[in-house]
Amino acid sequence: NAGVTQTPKFQVLKTGQSMTLQCAQDMNHEYMSWYRQDPGMGLRLIHYSVGAGITDQGEVPNGYNVSRSTTEDFPLRLLSAAPSQTSVYFCASSYSLIYEQYFGPGTRLTVT
Amino acid sequence: KNEVEQSPQNLTAQEGEFITINCSYSVGISALHWLQQHPGGGIVSLFMLSSGKKKHGRLIATINIQEKHSSLHITASHPRDSAVYICAVSYVYGGATNKLIFGTGTLLAVQP
């Protein structure tokens, strides 16, 4: 099993550009989520999905879009990048939130 | 006040010392997670607890549901234990568990 994979590992964007962060898992997990990690703050939930075709907002959803067309993939789209979106982004998956959580390696995004 | 608080924020120990990291939470939960993140690295799940105590090698995690408190202990600490340790709770709201709330982490440095 590859576990949870994320691409790219690093990305630099200019303000206003858009991009998609990819996340995939091969463990047949229903629950997938995106977090951002900023210095001095705990991980914060951006969006999550409890299964294919079902997504919902977390605590910091503005400026981000998600879709879940398959169980395996959960891409995160930045619609119009802003410097405030400079962060490290982690994708995670699990059977549910009362089971072990599996995290991807992270994407370090810088918006200039 | 944060819903999940960890103490201490920073901890320096000598190799071989017994280490305790604490986590207190103020919300209803269905599970508590301890995670480890090495500098510049990904996030790995160490434990998932809903009651009692779990042990894995030199690591022990306990939870007291009534007191809303958990501890992570490291026995015979080693420099390779140097990392950020993150407490997260599976938050129960409206009868469902649909998100994790994270503490800000404890940065542990174990000196040889």
Image (spheres, rainbow, N blue to C red):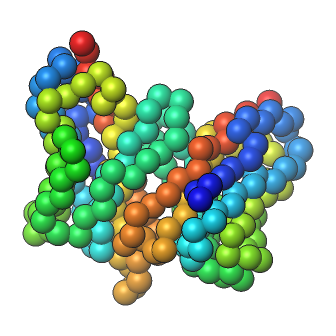
Which x, y percent locates residue A44?
A: 51, 53
Seen in the picture, residue B37 relative to A25 is either above or below; the reply is above
Q: Quadrant of residue A62?
A: bottom right
Q: Is residue A47 visible?
A: no
- Image quadrant assignment for residue A25: bottom right
In this rendering, position of residue B1 left or right of residue A25: left
Q: Residue at x 67, y 37 (%)?
A: A108
Give the residue furthest to the bottom. B95
In this rendering, the answer to whether A12 lies above or below A72 is above
- In the image, A7 versus B98, the foreground residue is A7
Residue depicted at 30% across the width and 68% down the height? B31
- Residue under the image location 37 percent in, 31 percent down: B83
Viewed as shown, does residue B13 lie left or right of A75? Answer: left
| Residue B91 appears left or right of A8 | left
Q: B80 or B21: nearer the eye? A: B80
Dividing the image into 4 quarters, which one contains the C terminus of chain B? top left
Residue A75 location (% of width, % of height): 74, 61
- A65 sits to left or right of B54: right
Q: Is residue B67 visible?
A: yes
**Eyeballing the image, is B5 above or below B58?**
below
Q: Residue at 21% x, 45% y: name it.
A: B57
